[in-house]
Image (cartoon, rainbow, N blue to C red):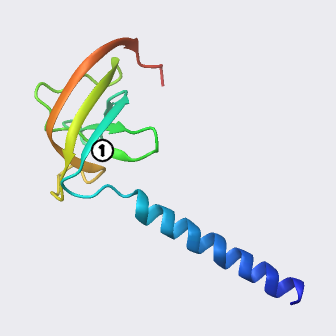
C-alpha cells in the first residue's frame, strides 16, 4: 500500500473512532448522573448549567433551590431527560438533588 492510501486509512479510522466515542459518551434519557462542579449561568439569565468532568454540559435549571452560579462547587445527582428547554443548551436534568461543598469556584 502506498503512503497516501495508508494516510487516508489512518484518517478514516480516527474519524470513525471519534464518532463512535461521541455516540457512546452521550447520556441516555432516564440514566442517573452524579456531577461535581461549579454551576454557571446559561445563555439565558434564568438558566443554570453544570459541566461534568468529561465535558458534557447539563442543564440544571430545574434544581430547587437553584445553586448560585460561580459561587461554590456543588455535588449533584439528577436524572437525564429527553425534554427540551428554553435554555437550548445541555442535557436537561430532573429529580435534582445537590449539596454545596466548601470549595470556592475558580474565578473565570
Choose between 62 and 9: the one closer to the eye. 9
Image spot of residue 7 (x, y percent): 79, 78
Tell me if 22 is positioned left or right of 95 in this view: right
Quadrant assignment, res 26: bottom left
Tell me if 9 is positioned left or right of 99 in this view: right
Q: From this view, report whether residue 63 is shown above or below residue 56.
A: above
Q: From this view, report whether residue 101 is shown above or below residue 81.
A: above
Residue at screen point 30% across, 50% down? 90
Q: From this view, report whether residue 15 is shown above or below residue 22.
A: below
**Residue 45 visible in the shown view:** yes
Choose between 42 and 83: the one closer to the eye. 83
Image spot of residue 51 (x, y percent): 38, 39
**Residue 43 visible in the shown view:** no
Looking at the image, the residue that sits furthest to the top is 102
Tell me if 48 is positioned left or right of 1 in this view: left
For disc 1, the neighbor class at 10 Å (few under 14, some 14 to 19, many from 20) is many
Question: What is the secondary structure assignment of the residue under circle 1?
Answer: strand
Quadrant assignment, res 63: top left
Residue at screen point 25% across, 22% down? 68
Image spot of residue 17 (x, y percent): 57, 69
Residue highlighted by disc 1: 58
Amino acid at each position: 500500500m502506498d503512503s497516501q492510501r495508508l494516510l487516508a486509512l489512518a484518517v478514516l479510522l480516527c474519524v470513525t473512532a471519534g464518532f463512535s466515542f461521541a455516540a457512546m459518551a452521550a447520556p441516555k434519557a432516564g440514566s442517573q448522573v452524579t456531577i461535581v462542579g461549579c454551576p454557571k449561568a446559561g445563555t439565558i439569565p434564568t438558566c443554570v448549567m453544570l459541566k461534568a468532568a468529561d465535558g458534557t454540559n447539563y442543564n440544571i435549571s430545574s434544581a430547587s433551590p437553584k445553586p448560585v452560579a460561580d459561587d461554590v462547587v456543588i455535588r449533584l445527582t439528577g436524572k437525564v431527560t429527553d425534554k427540551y428547554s428554553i435554555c437550548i443548551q445541555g442535557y436537561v436534568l430532573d429529580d435534582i438533588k445537590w449539596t454545596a461543598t466548601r470549595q470556592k469556584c475558580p474565578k473565570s
